[in-house]
């Protein structure tokens, strides 16, 4: 065989002819001049995905080839491609049956055995529709042998997919043997990671001076930027300065970066930034703010940073700071002070640092709904992070449930297949706890029944994302208050350490705590229908994780 190894094969960088000593060449061709014009138009209007679910990748494995060690690698390349693409959030059809797939819609990437598929019935023509910017290939020895109308088939032709509407295609002009074929796993990995058509096919082709021909606009891309992210100030940081410096990584763009834009609290705060750092001309207000960055290329295509971070401006912050949470008077955009408290325990859990104390205010009839799972840990130098109620006589309640009452959210309908007075409602979470009563302040945990269609009065059941409840004597679905466990944990996590909890009541969570080191009496286990777990003054030291 007279070929040379491709030095650019399986690389992960933009192509450089000076570095690799070669050129990447693609063709613009088809059966007719009009098809070539259409291909150019599709390329110039290629779908911009930025890793979102636009279009579907169709990978058609022929399982009969798995029995041949020479052919099996191509099936495995398709399987690898499927895993990569799914991990990036793309729609993927990986067919591993004997069926030759046809008539798929909105295809963004395609690879198959073409006419070599065991069950092809139409010269390897899939009959798909494609989104602009779609690319593909087939494991066929001579699919690029001709782009002339009337070519005798024998093996399938790349030109048929161009006619159907694909925007990029690789094929062989003569027998390349499987080791010389383009690798679809590399192709789709690079193409969805921001590389253009020529680079993607170049990195996917193992051999030079051999049999492969690539059709398509070499500069066509569907991801105009390689992903980038913000870096500083870090997420959930506490800052004493009102004029912090913002920094982020530099994205790779084939078109080149024209400018950056900084968004604070969802609003454009600074435009026409030329480097990957900046400060604001006006100080930030005291409290919490979100921020992210957008990059704009020379063609006015926009990419947004992968993350949006939160920062907390608290000018008078000290290491032993005390924060406050009030789910009636608070707001998570506040500074968390006694006069300007936060609203949720989730905000407190994400923000509190070593040595901080968080006082959670009790409001009768208004439970906290959220997980108190600290993001940070305490330490020996600064001390534990303490989460506590106001006092032993004023303990706030953290509920792991959602209000699913008919009067609040609706959706309860009569269940026709079971006992009388059985109602049902869509509820996605597999719940372990249901509490029912005339009001939010007067609830009773109910016992789970054994089946949907044989519920005793006052019992509940959950199956297949549906919650069932059979009314007890005198109850009305329109006036009942119903709570269903929606969150798995009330407090704690499996990572953070040196956390102290005190004077808190946890109710209606599906389990008690994610932290395996929080050991408590069986009778107080939140997963038990008998009672709720309560942190007491005498017990709280037992639950300090160190």
Image (tube, rainbow, N blue to C red):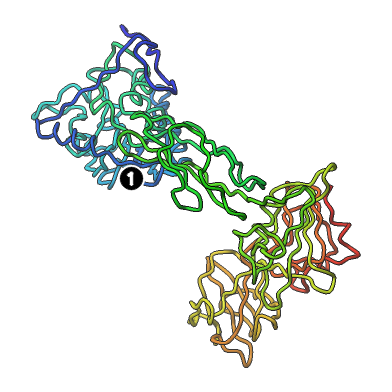
Pick out the residue farthest to the front.
Answer: 282
Q: Residue at x 33, y 39 (%)?
A: 301
Pick out the residue farthest to the bottom.
Answer: 474
- How far across and how far down the image is residue 528, in percent? 75, 69
Q: Quadrant of the N terminus?
A: top left
Q: Residue at x 81, y 66 (%)?
A: 503
User: In the image, is residue 350 above or below residue 171?
Assistant: below
User: In the image, is residue 523 above or below residue 496?
Assistant: below
User: Is 315 positioned to the left or the right of 39 in the image?
Assistant: right
Residue at disc 1, secondary structure: loop
- How far across and how far down the image is residue 129, in percent? 23, 44
- How far across and how far down the image is residue 393, in percent? 83, 74
Mark 1 Cα shell of 10 Å, populated few (<14), some (14-19), many (≥20): many
Which residue is denoted by mark 1 in the rendering?
Answer: 55
User: In the image, is residue 468 above or below residue 269?
Assistant: below
Q: Is residue 65 visible?
A: no
Q: Quadrant of residue 427?
A: bottom right
User: Is 40 positioned to the left or the right of 529 in the image?
Assistant: left
Pick out the residue farthest to the right.
Answer: 538
Relative depth, front residue between 66 and 285: 285
Q: Quadrant of residue 24?
A: top left
Q: Residue at x 35, y 26 (%)?
A: 200
- How far across and how far down the image is residue 87, in percent? 48, 40
Q: Is residue 201 visible?
A: yes
Total labels: the figure holds 1
Relative depth, front residue between 202 and 415: 202
User: Is 402 positioned to the left or the right of 211 in the image?
Assistant: right
User: In the image, is residue 186 above or below residue 500?
Assistant: above
């Amino acid at each position: 065989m007279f070929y040379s190894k491709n030095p650019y094969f399986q690389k992960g960088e933009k192509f450089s002819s000076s570095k690799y000593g070669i050129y990447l060449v693609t063709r613009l061709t088809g059966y007719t001049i009009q098809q070539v014009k259409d291909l150019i138009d599709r390329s110039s209007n290629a779908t911009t995905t930025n890793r979102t679910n636009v279009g579907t990748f169709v990978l058609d494995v022929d399982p009969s080839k798995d029995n041949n060690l020479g052919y099996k690698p191509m099936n495995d390349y398709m399987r690898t491609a499927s895993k990569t693409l799914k991990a990036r959030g793309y729609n993927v059809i990986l067919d591993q049956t004997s069926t030759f797939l046809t008539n798929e819609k909105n295809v963004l990437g395609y690879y198959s055995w073409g006419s070599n598929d065991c069950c092809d019935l139409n010269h390897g023509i899939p009959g798909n529709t494609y989104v602009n910017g779609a690319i593909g290939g087939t494991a066929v020895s001579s699919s690029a042998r001709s782009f002339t109308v009337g070519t005798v088939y024998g093996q399938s032709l790349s030109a048929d997919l161009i006619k159907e509407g694909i925007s990029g295609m690789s094929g062989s002009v003569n027998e390349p043997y499987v080791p010389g074929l383009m690798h679809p796993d590399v192709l789709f990995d690079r193409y969805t990671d921001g590389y253009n058509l020529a680079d993607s096919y170049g990195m996917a082709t193992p051999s030079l001076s051999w049999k492969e021909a690539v059709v398509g606009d070499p500069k066509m891309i569907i991801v105009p930027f390689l992903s980038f992210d913000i870096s500083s100030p870090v997420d959930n940081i506490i800052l004493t300065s009102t004029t912090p410096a913002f920094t982020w990584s530099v994205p790779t763009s084939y078109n080149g970066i024209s400018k950056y834009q900084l968004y604070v609290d969802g609003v454009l705060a600074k435009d026409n930034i030329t480097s990957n750092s900046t400060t604001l001309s006006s100080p930030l207000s005291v409290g919490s703010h979100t921020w992210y960055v957008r990059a704009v290329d020379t063609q006015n295509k926009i990419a947004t940073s992968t993350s949006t971070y939160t920062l907390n401006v608290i000018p008078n912050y000290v290491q032993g700071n005390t924060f406050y949470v009030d789910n009636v008077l608070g707001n998570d955009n506040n500074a968390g002070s006694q006069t300007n408290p936060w609203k949720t325990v989730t905000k407190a859990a994400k923000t509190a640092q070593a040595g901080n104390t968080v006082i959670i205010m009790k409001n009768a009839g208004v439970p906290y709904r959220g997980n108190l799972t600290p993001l940070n840990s305490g330490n020996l130098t600064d001390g534990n992070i303490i989460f506590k109620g106001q006092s032993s006589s004023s303990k706030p309640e953290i509920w792991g449930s959602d209000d699913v009452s008919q009067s609040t959210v609706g959706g309860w309908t009569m269940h026709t297949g079971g006992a009388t007075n059985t109602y049902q409602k869509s509820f996605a979470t597999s719940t372990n706890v249901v509490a029912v009563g005339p009001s939010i302040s007067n609830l009773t945990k109910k016992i789970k029944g054994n089946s949907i269609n044989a519920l005793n009065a006052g019992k509940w059941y959950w199956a297949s994302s549906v919650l069932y409840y059979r009314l007890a004597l005198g109850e009305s679905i329109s006036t009942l208050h119903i709570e269903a466990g929606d969150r798995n944990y009330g407090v704690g996590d499996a990572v953070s350490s040196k956390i102290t909890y005190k004077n808190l009541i946890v109710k209606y969570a599906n389990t008690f705590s994610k932290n395996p080191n929080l050991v408590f009496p069986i009778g107080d286990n939140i997963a038990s229908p008998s009672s709720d777990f309560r942190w007491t003054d005498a017990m709280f030291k037992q639950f300090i994780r160190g």
